[in-house]
Structures are given as C-alpha cells and as structure tokens.
Image (cartoon, helix red, strand yellow):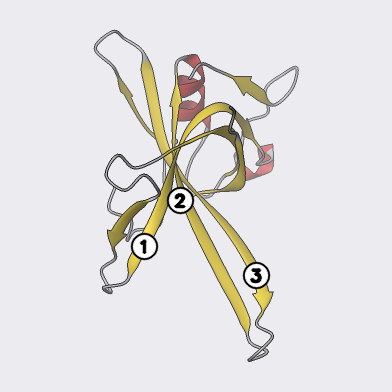
Amino acid sequence: MYQKIIIVGNLGRDPEMRYMPDGTAVTSFSVATSRRWTDRATGQPVDETTWFRVSVWGRQAETANEYLSKGRKVLVEGQITPDRNTGGPRLWTAQDGTVRASFEVKADTVRFLSSREEGGYEPSGGDDFGGVAQEEDDIPF
C-alpha cells in the first residue's frame, strides 16, 4: 500500500531547524492551504484554511531552513503521519475556544515556488530538492 500527499501553500512562520543526536538535521515549518467558494444556501463567500505541520530531514532540511521564510510559497510532497492518540489530525483548542486541527507531514520533496523578487530561492538545475525522509500565531507549536 502507498500514500502520498501534495501540498501547495504558504509558510505560516519561519522554519525551525534542530539536529538529532546522530547529527541528522530536521527542519519543521507549517504550511497553510486555502480555498474560497460561494455558499449555495446563503450566497456568501466562504474561506477555508487547512494547516499542515511539515518535517524535512537531512540535507534538504538544511536547505529549507536556509532559504524558506514566513509567507513564502512552497510545494511539499510526502506522507501524512497520524496523531498517535487519535489516529487522525492533531487536534487543539485555539485561544477563542474553537477546536482546530493540523495534519503532520513527513516531506520527501520540497520545492520553493516563490520568485527571487519575493525572496525565494531558485536553485540552478531545477527547483526540486529530493531528500530522505514539516502559522498562524494561534497555532500552539
């Protein structure tokens, strides 16, 4: 069996990198995807944002940490990692008391989509960094 998710969105905050005891780099960041539609019943526009918490490993983690920043557009390919307690998305309560969810993704590939003018990075020979192997202010991580 096989699963793969492809996410295109914007970074919610700057990436955070750390090193595992064996020296392997791990960079974490959140990606927001949005969609907008008109509600048929009310005729009002509806905005929906889904958050993904992404982890990137190895050399790709170091590259992502160096060139990505809050607001940049990114494409992530990887696998969803379910919450150990629920088997689904990570659930949490926002400051306004509403229940929110975010999905954990272990990235296989990260592509930087922002242009150089937007401060993005465009590597020579393509924009793909295949690797081994993740906001709003109210997200608690």
- Residue 100, which numbered label? 1
Label 2 or label 1, whichever lies nearer to me, is: 1
Residue projecting furthest to the right: 125
Near mark 3 (Cα within 10 A), the count class, few <14, some 14-19 or many ≥20, is: few
Residue bearing mark 3? 36
Separation (CA) of disc 2 from disc 1: 15 Å
- Secondary structure state at the residue bearing disc 1: strand
25 to 9, vertically: above or below = above
**Left or right: where does residue 60 sit relative to residue 44?**
left
Look at the numbered discs 3 and 1 and tell me whether their residues touch, using CB distance below 8 Å.
no
Residue bearing mark 2? 12
Q: How far across and down, in percent of the image, does residue 28 sit? A: 39, 34
Q: What residue type is labelled 3?
A: Arg
41 to 29, vertically: above or below = below
**Corner quadrant of residue 47:** bottom right
Give me the residue at 68% from left, 89% from top. Answer: 43
**Corner quadrant of residue 75:** top right
Separation (CA) of disc 3 from disc 2: 18 Å
